[in-house]
Amino acid sequence: SQTIHQWPATLVQPVGSPLSLECTVEGTSNPNLYWYRQAAGRGLQLLFYSVGIGQISSEVPQNLSASRPQDRQFILSSKKLLLSDSGFYLCAWTLIGLNTEAFFGQGTRLTVV
Amino acid sequence: AQSVTQLDSHVSVSEGTPVLLRCNYSSSYSPSLFWYVQHPNKGLQLLLKYTSAATLVKGINGFEAEFKKSETSFHLTKPSAHMSDAAEYFCVVSVRGGADGLTFGKGTHLIIQP
């Protein structure tokens, strides 16, 4: 069966520090991968998605970047965090194809102080 | 284009009473529809999905939803609320393949009163 791992679960970082969140998927090949952000009391905002190794699409211009160095690995990064980067970050994957559901990781609570 | 509207940002019910979470969608094509649940500081878990088969869909934990094309609705129901149902619920629509094909509603916070 397929599983998705996302870490760390919580993170407190000072303003201006770098960020690296990692997500890996097991049990499937060539998934579509996503990074979402969920601000307090708000819905999900799609940040990045990837259809393959090295292929990244950005939905929202911002202080963050994403990379996909391996088929089932998706990394969210920042060189210098801002206070506004605080939030709950979720990694997800879907199978390629029409109308397939997304499977989510457990999320990372990022607090920038 | 596609969109999802969750009509209530908060719903409060008493334990043991029915739950109704409302969702309306718009799309140019036949959609697939999903309901997800999110407990605090957790990821989203799929409750149920509609993909053009039976219009009444049964999911986990006693939830079900009915796809009504004429009303462009996909409301989530449960006959009897349990305290563990307290969570955030998201309605999601998908009308095409592709990595960015999912559109999320803004969520409904379900409160269960003892």
Image: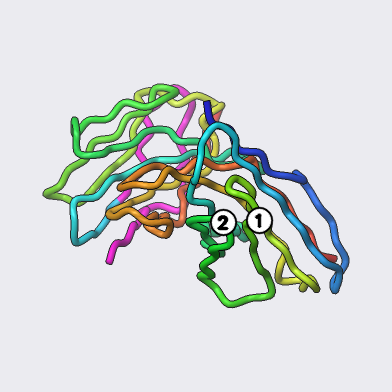
Q: Is residue A66 left or right of residue B54?
A: right
Q: Is residue A99 left or right of residue A89?
A: left
Residue at the extreme left of the image, as rendered: B70
Mark 1 or mark 2, earlier in chain: 2
- In the rendered image, residue B112 lying in the magenta stretch gets the answer no
Task: Please determine if labels 1 and 2 lie on a single subunit.
Answer: yes
- In the rendered image, residue B15 lying in the magenta stretch gets the answer yes
Query: Which residue is depicted at the point 17% across and 43% down?
Result: B68
Q: Nearer the viewer, residue B93 or A31?
A: A31
Q: Position of residue A110 (x, y in %)?
A: 75, 56
Q: Position of residue A45 (x, y in %)?
A: 53, 62
For label 1, the residue is A69
Query: Which residue is depicted at the point 49% across and 38% down?
Result: B37
Q: Which quadrant does the C terminus of chain A fall into?
A: bottom right
For label 2, the residue is A53
Q: Nearer the viewer, residue B96 or B89?
A: B96
- Considering the numbered disc 1 on the image, is that residue within a helix, a strand or a loop? strand
Tell me which chain the residue with mark 2 is part of.
A
Q: Position of residue B109 (x, y in %)?
A: 50, 46
Q: Residues within 10 Å of mark 1 (few under 14, many from 20)?
A: few
Q: Residues within 10 Å of mark 2 (few under 14, many from 20)?
A: some
Query: Which residue is depicted at the point 23% across and 59% down?
Result: B27
Q: Position of residue B50 (x, y in %)?
A: 28, 38
Which residue type carries mark 2? Ile
Numbered tag placed on residue B3 in the rendering:
none
Dots 1, 2 in contact, CB < 8 A: yes
**Where A9 sits versus B102, above or below?**
above
- Considering the numbered disc 2 on the image, is that residue within a helix, a strand or a loop? loop
Q: Quadrant of residue A13?
A: bottom right
Q: Which residues are magenta?
A: B1-23
